[in-house]
Image (cartoon, rainbow, N blue to C red):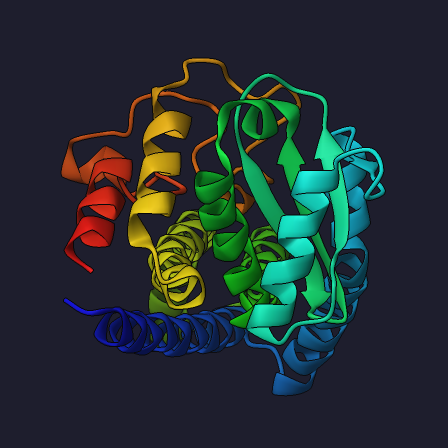
Amino acid sequence: MNTYSAIASNKRKTWLIMVLFVVFLTTLVYVFVKALGYDLSYVFLALIATTFISFLSYFASGKIVLSSLGAKKITKDEYPEFFRIVENLSIGAGLPMPSVFVINDASPNAFATGRDPNHSVICATTGLLNRLDKIELEGVIAHELSHIKNYDIRLMGIVAILVGSAVILSNFFLRSMGHNRESRGNIQIIFLVIGLVFALLSPLIATLIQLAISRKREYLADASAVLLTRYPNGLASALEKISSDPKPLNGASNATAHLFIANPFKNKESKTWLTSLFNTHPPIEERIKILHSM
């Protein structure tokens, strides 16, 4: 597998999952409407309200994440090598210089956030800056810049909107069941049963789709980082060091775990098919293997 084919493959798979997500959400709305006997106008209003609230959260998500992790904005004088690497690679990638933040934590990790290249942030832990050499750090920063350049930070924001919509719609349906006690025909009863199953399972399904997209974007960012640095072994070596460190990242949560270059909880990736569905990242071993093959 070469770098270009890896990028093309992951782009196709990501957008396929996105299309399936939209189809899933549309089906969810249709079943709920049929089960409750409502006019479609109610659903459109609910979707508009959900989207509006989600977009407000999306625009502020970067600041919320940085604040929750205790990240501090830095200058070139404080961390000259880190700042210079971000600066030089941003020029090479044709990107505006992102804001640079540091988390005072011994666990080596990094992430990018924001809504677009003009409003982006790269953040690393002190553990990462202390443990990696320059070539390895360049690989990590190139990976995070690739998330910015590939608009992964925006894509994950859109996916979060879809997940939020599925959860809110499911809650709305479950609450409406108790208030809508009008006589129902056989068809509506069938849709009611299907709707109940969807309402219970849809938040889980939506989260699984979100995690699947997140994992695909990690592969894509790895491949894009290699295009930028022209040295896959740098990122591969960095991932080996990050994954071998046993210290979890303080302040990391399920809501922010998918942002990091590697699982911040440091628990072993699940090996079984069922439990691996809930991993926020693809297996480090698989990523390293692909990088070495480039």
Q: Is residue 98 above or below residue 282?
A: below
* Residue situated in front as seen by the camera: 237 or 106: 237
- Quarter of the image for residue 95 reads bottom right
Above or below, 187 relative to 161: below
In the image, 268 versus 93, the foreground residue is 93
Viewport quadrant of the N terminus: bottom left
| Residue 165 appears in the picture as rendered | no
Location of the C terminus (image quadrant): bottom left
Q: Is residue 2 left or right of residue 86?
A: left
Which residue is rendered at x = 62% and y = 50% of the image? 85
Residue 238 can be seen, yes or no: yes
Task: Please identify the residue farthest to the top as the structure is shown.
Answer: 246
**Residue 150, relative to residue 262: is it above or below?**
below
Of 48 and 288, which appears nearest the observer?
A: 288
Query: What residue is at 46 percent from the left and 78 percent from the top?
Result: 26
On screen, residue 19 above or below 271: below
Whole-percent x, y for residue 248 in the image: 51, 18
Where in the figure is residue 47, as x and y percent of width and height? 67, 74
* Depth order, front residue of 12/46: 12
How many numbered marks does the figure carry?
0
User: Which residue is at 45% across, 69% downward?
Assistant: 28
Q: Residue at x 26, y 47 (%)?
A: 287
Give how far across and how far down residue 55 sits, in percent. 75, 67
Apparent side of residue 193 relative to residue 203 in the rendered image (left or right):
left
Q: Is residue 48 toward the left or the right of residue 107 in the image?
A: right
Residue 244: percent from the left, percent from the top?
Answer: 34, 20
